[in-house]
Image (cartoon, helix red, strand yellow):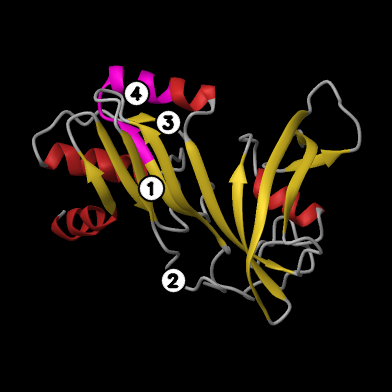
Amino acid sequence: MGTEKRKIEETILYEDKDILVCRKPGGLPVQTRKIGMMDMESMLKNYLAAKGENPYLAVIHRLDQPVQGILVFGKNQRSGARLSEEMQKGEMRKIYLACVRGIPENQEGTLEDQIEKVPGSNLSRIVEKKTKNSKKAVLEYKVLKEENGCSLLEIHLKTGRHHQIRLQLAHAGWPILGDTKYNEKSPKGEWEELGLCASRLSFYHPTTGKKMEFQVKPDGNFPIV
């Protein structure tokens, strides 16, 4: 328990009686139903229990398992409900960094598509026209750096759809490095990690109303920084 506690403590960016902000490593799921697999939620609950606190956590938002970056949890029902309300109203601002193959023609722009989940799989797809199951997906991008035919993009999500960033960038012709799910041409093992990081998060504290802002740099084998 000592080693696990020390590791999980290193991921925590901020904590008080109402919220907990942490940095999820790439490869670790936020939640999982797989027997024997640890997830971020369980590790944080173990951490709280070891401190003698109520191990309650409200999951406000999620990151795909291979994606690294910032998450905020509510430590009680009241704070969880308020943070969820912020999320639903679009008041929680999330900025991502994505390393992609290719260089966009425009240094910044907006991608807007109709996305629907593929039945019977953990995949989504873009459809040309609105369907019964599709939802509008919008993101804004800005090119920060170009290197060896690849780009580092800053991504501002306007909507939160399943695999949205990975799918929209691949559809635009700029697949994320290391993403074999939406880039069939990406050789397995080309990159050890997915080139996607939830690098900035801002929201209003559910009790004090103070604006909270957090930022991290990608770590590990992130292709371009």
- Residue 75 position (above or below residue 63): above
Numbered disc in front, either 4 or 1: 4
| Image location (x, y in percent) of residue 154 | 59, 57
Query: Is residue 188 something that shows in the picture?
Result: yes
Query: Residue 181 magenta-drawn?
Result: no
Three-letter code, disc 3? Ile
- Residue 93 position (above or below residue 181): above
Query: Is residue 63 something that shows in the picture?
Result: no
| Contact flag, marks 4 and 1 (Cβ < 8 Å) | no
Q: Earlier in the sequence, mark 2 or mark 1?
A: 1
Q: Marks 2 and 3, how far apart in space?
A: 25 Å
Q: Residue at x 67, y 47 (%)?
A: 140
Q: Earlier in the sequence, mark 1 or mark 3?
A: 1
Three-letter code, disc 1? Gly
Residue under label 4: 80
Q: Residue at x 27, y 33 (%)?
A: 19
| Image location (x, y in percent) of residue 25 | 40, 57
| Contact flag, marks 1 and 3 (Cβ < 8 Å) | no
| Image location (x, y in percent) of residue 11 | 29, 55
Classed neighbour count for the residue bearing mark 4: other residues with Cα under 10 Å, few (<14), some (14–19), many (≥20): many
Residue extent of the magenta highlight: 72-84
Q: Marks 4 and 3, how far apart in space?
A: 7 Å
Residue under label 2: 220
| Magenta part, dominant SS | helix
Per the rendering, the mark at residue 60 is: 3
Helix, strand or loop at label 4? It is helix
| Contact flag, marks 4 and 3 (Cβ < 8 Å) | yes
Q: Marks 1 and 3, how far apart in space?
A: 24 Å
Per the rendering, the mark at residue 36 is: 1
> Disc count in the image?
4
Q: Residue at x 12, y 42 (%)?
A: 50
